[in-house]
Amino acid sequence: MAKRIAAATVDALGPHDLAAVVHTGTGTAQNFTRNRPLLLSAVQSPFMGGREGDEWATSTPRDRWLPPLSADSPVAAGDCPSGNCTLETLTRIAESLRDLPRRKSLIFIGTTIALQRKERPELNRLREQLFRALDVANLTVYPIDVKGLESLALDTTYKGSRPDPRTYVSVTAQSLIRQGDFKSIADRTGGRAIVNANDPDVIVPDIFRESGSYYTLGFVAASMDNRYHDIKVQVNRRDVSIHSRKSHYAGATERPPALENRGAPSDLIAAISSQWPRGDLPLNVSVAAFADPSGSKSIAALTVRLPATGTLAALAVAFDTIGSAVNSYWQTLDASAVLPPGAHSEFEVLFRLPLDPGRYGIRAAIRDGNGRIGSVYTDVDVPNFAKAPVSLSGVIVDAAPPTPSGPERTFDELLPFLPTARREFDATSEVRAFTRVHQGGINALEPVRVSTKVQDTSGRTVFERGRTLAVADFTARAADVFLNLPGGTFAPGEYLLTIEATLRTSTARRDVRFEVR
């Protein structure tokens, strides 16, 4: 049910909405993106919830609630072994979104948000921290209960012998408290709670319709007394339902801690430590994963494009799906050494990050010679080139004239030409693309069918080409594929380049978006 609701949320996103997937326990996270396949992949991946989720799926209404939930059960403790994960995770999310001046909604999908329990006085502190963070971030919360319809009537809940009334009263009280927590956090933030619904996923589009029309009202607090204050919003219109924040704290929460120092300059670390990229220095990024014939790990070939001046300081960090930094590299280089004198040209900084197979979030930050700092975030999927029946490296592109870049020799013996993060081309540009096809395992090599097509924004195919790679085309179980997109082929507009490699029933695919001006 949780995955159904999350998938429905992804489907309801608008074309310009950004979304992220976060777990209160362990699971595959996904940073903010418009890429729906990435979001759905994180939703469908295995994750660890409270044990109660498995117990519920195989239980009956009678044994589901007997004996009453103990204070240290995963449900009563907040759906995580430590008992605090849910409130702490929601607080971190709110803190990361505090400086984003736009509509923000958090859809909580689960069974419990433990806001107050007699046997757990520490929840009071965690609850107050959460409420303060939600107030400062102006974050609307829509909690959705995955348990479905719960009847509190004795005869419908228990079939067969009647339970001890004292047990029933305890169970009923806990159910009301649990649902009350959902409603409390929704009322506090101007959202609404969805409880007692057997098909809550069909209600998700209503949430987006409600949050699609909104007003932001601001006021100057009389004092920053760090105290609780009520908020009341009224309108002089008929047939209008108002959902707004009910209160706020006249004081801010502390900012979340920055990424630990890994030897890089602290200002670059700060630029990649927030939830959102820093835009003082405009950056474009491209990343493509390639198997390294000389090493055990694959290589993420990262290119960051910027209007360069003077000496640059650049940092790149790769994070795994649970947010751990698994590799990083920082460097300084003089862009003026390769640019024509007095030129105000663009420059591309190259990074080579060794990575194991898997999905990673890549963050890069650069400081230019004038002290401006920018950061940019992207994702990369590193295939298991050695084991997958057929796989594709990333796709790199280039166009004449080439953009000055550095450091030199970053991708020697790995790529046939230097990649560019440029994705806007003139109508007359000669654009070339490159990818590498791999056959993993130890079976005998076979021919592989490679198809290439370019589609416009209406889905119409404007360019198509196919070829079959023979066994003789493969060296060390890899074959290079080059594609030239001749100038004058495409009218101005946006396009999607798709490359697919097929071996029997296995298919690998890569997509690249580009624009013709």
Image: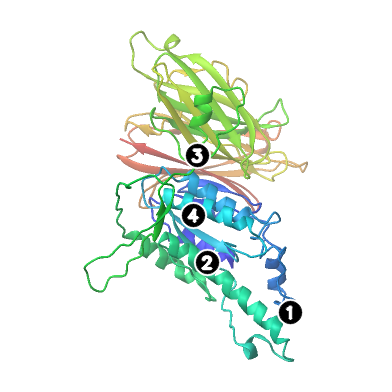
| Mark 1–mark 4 distance (CA, rounded to whole Å) | 35 Å
Q: Earlier in the sequence, mark 3 or mark 4?
A: 4
Instruction: Report helix, strand or loop for mark 4.
Output: helix
**Looking at the image, can residue 140 be seen?**
yes
Three-letter code, disc 4: Phe
Depth check, mark 2 against mark 4: the one in front is: 4
Residue type at mark 3 is: Arg
Q: CA distance from mark 3 to mark 4?
A: 15 Å
Determine which residue is flagged by label 2.
Answer: 182
Sequence-wise, which precedes: disc 3 or disc 2?
Answer: 2
Residue 63 marker: 1
Q: Which residue in the protein does label 4 denote?
A: 131
Q: Name the residue tied to disc 3.
A: 255
Distance of mark 1 from mark 3, alpha carbons? 45 Å
- Neighbours of disc 3 within 10 Å: few (<14), some (14-19), many (20+): few
**How busy is the neighbourhood of tag 2: few (under 14 within 10 Å), some, or many (20 plus)?**
many
In the picture shown, does residue 410 fall above or below 123? Answer: above
| Element at label 1 | loop
In the image, is 288 to the left or to the right of 244? right
Position in image of residue 366 (x %, y %): 47, 24
